Image (cartoon, helix red, strand yellow):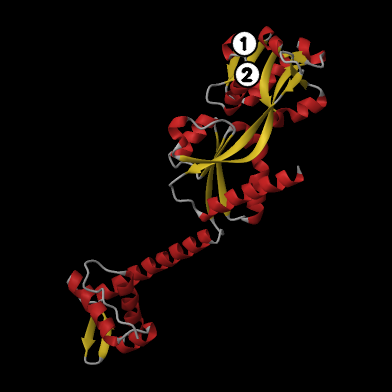
Amino acid sequence: MREVSDFTMAGMTLEQLRIFLAVAEHLHFTRAAEGLYITQPAVSAAIHSLETEYRIKLFHRIGRHVEITEAGQLLQIEAQKILEQVGLTERGLKELNNLQRGELKLGSSLTIGNYWLPEKISQFQRQYSGIIVNCTLANTEEICLGTANGQFDLGLIEGEVKPILQKSLDQEEIGSDRLLIVVGQSHPWFKREQVDLAELKNTDWVMRETGSGTQQRLEEALKNWGINLNELQVILVLNTGEMVKAVVEEGHVAAGISELMVKKELKLGILKAVRIIDHRKSLTQELELIRPFVKIKHCQRFQTKIAQTFEKMLLLNDISLQKSA
């Protein structure tokens, strides 16, 4: 039999409440001790500690007979509620660890969230139906900040993490996408097979806002191709890819946009992806941009088993895609 030695500490403990309920049920100290597999003196000490702490009698001791007092009856009702709630809490924690319930908080940049991530979330929820997935869509800059602040368990971005946050966030590539230069049917480039790099300066452009991953990658590509963004005729700046796509479809403008976002329009012939050719070198070169999808998480914040499991699923998917490629 085990001894219980923490009854002199201030305030009541769960162990004391369990002992009290056993005595209240059996109305017998020895039987209560036997039921709990502890010693009878430990039971007496627990009840004595409660009565001393709160200066009230919980039981009448009449010879060898025990009766519960009015205060004891009150404590019996409340102690049962407390222990039931503790039991539910313990069960909830175990279920969280077993992926039976809980919440996964994701932050995703817009292109990933609208076109790449839904299939991954559906796959995860087919396996773990009790998990609630709460996904917030915003631009890359906002997702990085939210992940650094603990708003998201994981972030998924297609841009770069700002230097000020790089020490706080782990980064890992989990997929990729092509960024295309697209035009609509009314644009002069629509009927052409290719466009020279220098001609990019001769058309109007619609761009995404600062902080967008798409915009970051487009500006990087232009810089690598020897073109400064300020050299382009930017007539509109919009904060969603869908708005950019709609303007390109109807106007005489070009835009850099995710291939995922325009697959349907390209197939239907509503939009056209323009081949950009660089004639500056001895060998004519077609320019293209592959942009990575990056998973970010805080370097030091605790990762739940739910987040760890979703993260592993994303990485396994990436490995299987690489093998099939």
Residue that appears at 32% across and 80% down: 24
Return the residue found at the far top.
202
- Report the front residue among 118 and 169: 169
Kindly state the secondary structure of the residue where label 2 is placed: helix
Depicted 20 relative to depicted 145: above or below: below
Q: Earlier in the sequence, mark 2 or mark 1?
A: 2
Q: Which mark is residue 37?
A: none
Kindly state the secondary structure of the residue where label 1 is placed: loop
Q: Which mark is residue 232?
A: 1
Instruction: Judge whether residue 116 can be spotted in this image.
Output: yes
Q: Which residue is mark 2?
A: 222
Q: Please tell me whether mark 2 or mark 1 is closer to you in this view.
A: 2
Instruction: Judge whether residue 186 can be spotted in this image.
Output: no
Residue at mark 2 to residue at mark 1: CA–CA distance: 10 Å
- Report the front residue among 198 and 60: 198
Left of 138 or right of it: where is 281?
A: right
Q: Crowding near pointer 1: few (<14 within 10 Å), some, many (20+)?
A: some
Residue 103 in picture, x, y percent from top left: 52, 50
Depicted 125 relative to depicted 14: above or below: above
Return the residue found at the far front.
282
Residue 250 in picture, x, y percent from top left: 72, 15
Residue 280 in picture, x, y percent from top left: 71, 13
Residue 261, picture quadrant: top right
* Amino acid at the residue labelled 1: Leu
Find out whether the residues at labels 2 and 1 contact each other: C-beta distance under 8 Å. yes
Residue 124 in picture, x, y percent from top left: 63, 51
Quarter of the picture containing the C terminus is: top right
